[in-house]
Image (tube, grey):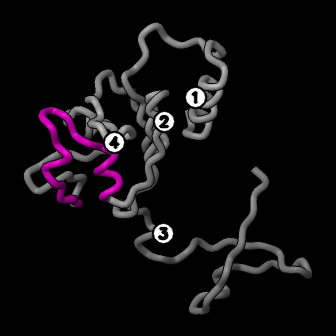
Amino acid sequence: MERRDFLRIVGAASLAPGAIDRPSVSPAATVLYDDRAVSLDRIGPAPKGDPDGLWIRKRDLPRVNGFELKPQGACRADLCIPIPKSLVRGEYFNLTAFAKKAGQPVVAEPGARVWSFGEMQALGGGLASSRIAPDFEVPDRLGRPVHLAGFRGKKALVITWASW
């Protein structure tokens, strides 16, 4: 299930309770990360002043985003992000504060127990590391094909639009 479809279903369920058959046991939280939904059976209480905070068990962290807590910080492959002690409380880890520290966008709906995490810039794919946009072809005003690669070494402004 794609993130967009999941958010649409959750949004419909919040507007029309009972419109969707819900399982008898619902997860404590659902985390949307990298186009997948991870159900967590237990989360920690968010402290006062941070109602959108998601405190997950440390052992659930690798399942959610592939990071592991180590003495040097939260690590995934050869990337380690130092974390302050305030992000760890007993067996729980503040996933939303970690995401914000790493520059990752977070959208939370605590009432529906859903948190969605965007792309983490530190883990960016080839486009972010190479800073070269993929080549594509579009017709110009006269209908002739124009390739983005034809503008290599020059500044180009690409404007896109979608109806959805």
- Distance CA(mark 2)–CA(mark 1): 10 Å
- Marks 4,1: beta carbons within 8 A: no
- Distance CA(mark 4)–CA(mark 3): 34 Å
Residue that badge 3 annotates: 127
| Rendered image: mark on residue 109 | 2
**Residue 60 figure quarter:** top left
Look at the image and give the residue range highlighted in magenta: 79-101
- Point out the frontmost of discs 2 and 3: 2
In the displayed structure image, the side of residue 11 where residue 139 appears, left or right: right
SS assignment at label 3: helix
SS assignment at label 1: helix
Q: Which mark sits nearer the N-terminus, 2 or 3?
A: 2
Q: Which mark sits nearer the N-terminus, 1 or 3?
A: 1
Residue count near mark 1 (Cα–Cα under 10 Å), binned few <14, some 14–19, many ≥20: some
Residue that badge 4 annotates: 50
Q: Which mark sits nearer the N-terminus, 2 or 4?
A: 4
- Distance CA(mark 2)–CA(mark 4): 13 Å
* Residue at the extreme front of the image, as rendered: 49
Residue 52 in the image: above or below residue 21: below
